Amino acid sequence: MNTMTKATGLSFLLVVFAVLGIDALAAGPAADVAAMHAVDQAWLKAYTAGDADVLAGLYDEQAMLMPPGAPAAHGRAAIRAFFVSDIAQSTKAGIALHLGPNPDGGVNGDMGWVSGSYSVTDKSGKVVETGKYLSVSKKKGGKWQYIRDTWNSDTAPPAAAAQAPKS
C-alpha cells in the first residue's frame, strides 16, 4: 500500500470517527436531560404513593430542599422529614400534584438542571394551584441526584395584614 492510499484511508477513518464522536456527544447531553426528567417522574410517583423514603433517596446526602413558605431542609434526613409532613397534609386535604408538559433541562459535565411547571388539583379534579419548579442535580455513580430543589406558586402570596401605625 503506497503512502497516498494510507493517507487517504487514515483521513477517511478520522472523518468517520469525528462524525461518530459528534453524534455521541450530541446524544450524551440529551440522554442526561432525559434521565433527569425520569428522576422527576420517579419523584412524582413516590410523592403520589406517599413514599418519603424513596423521595429522600432521590436527593444527595448534602442536598438542600427550598420549599416556599418554609425553612430550607438541609440534608437527606431533613428532606425526608419535610416530605413525611407535606405528604400527610396533602393526603388530608385530598390534593394531587401533577407535572406539566414540556419540561426543560440542561447539562454541563456531571451537573444538570431541570425546570418545568406543575399543577395541584383538589378531590373534584379542579385545579387549585399552578406553579413552576427548578432543580439542580449532580451525576454520581451514573445516577442523577438532586442537590438543590425548589418550587413556587404562580399565585401571589396573601397580602400582609396592615399594621397599625405606632404612636
Image (cartoon, grey):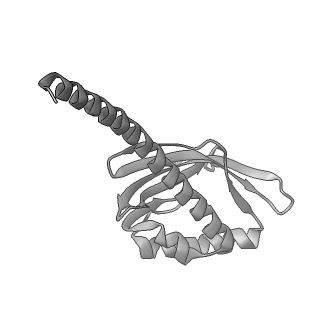
Residue 75 seen from this side = yes
Q: Is residue 91 above or below residue 25?
A: below
Farthest front residue?
1
- Residue sticking out furthest to the left: 3
Report whether 36 appears left or right of 60. right
Relative vertical location of residue 69 with respect to residue 92 in this rendering, above or below: above
Which residue is outermost to the top? 4
| Among the 4 quarters of the image, the one containing residue 87 | bottom right
Of the 4 image quadrants, the one containing the N terminus is top left
Whole-percent x, y for residue 19 in the image: 36, 32
* Residue 79 relative to residue 18: left or right: right
Which of the 4 quarters of the picture holds residue 121?
A: bottom right
Residue visible at 37% across and 57% down?
138
* Front position in the image: 122 or 37: 37
Q: Residue at x 12, y 25 (%)?
A: 3
* Any part of residue 159 in sight: no
- Above or below residue 33? Residue 57 is below
Identity of the residue drawn at 33% across and 33% down: 16
Q: Nearer the viewer, residue 53 or 157?
A: 53
Q: Position of residue 77 (x, y in %)?
A: 44, 76
Q: Position of residue 40 (x, y in %)?
A: 56, 57
- Position in image of residue 46 (x %, y %): 61, 69
Viewer-closest of 110 and 129: 110
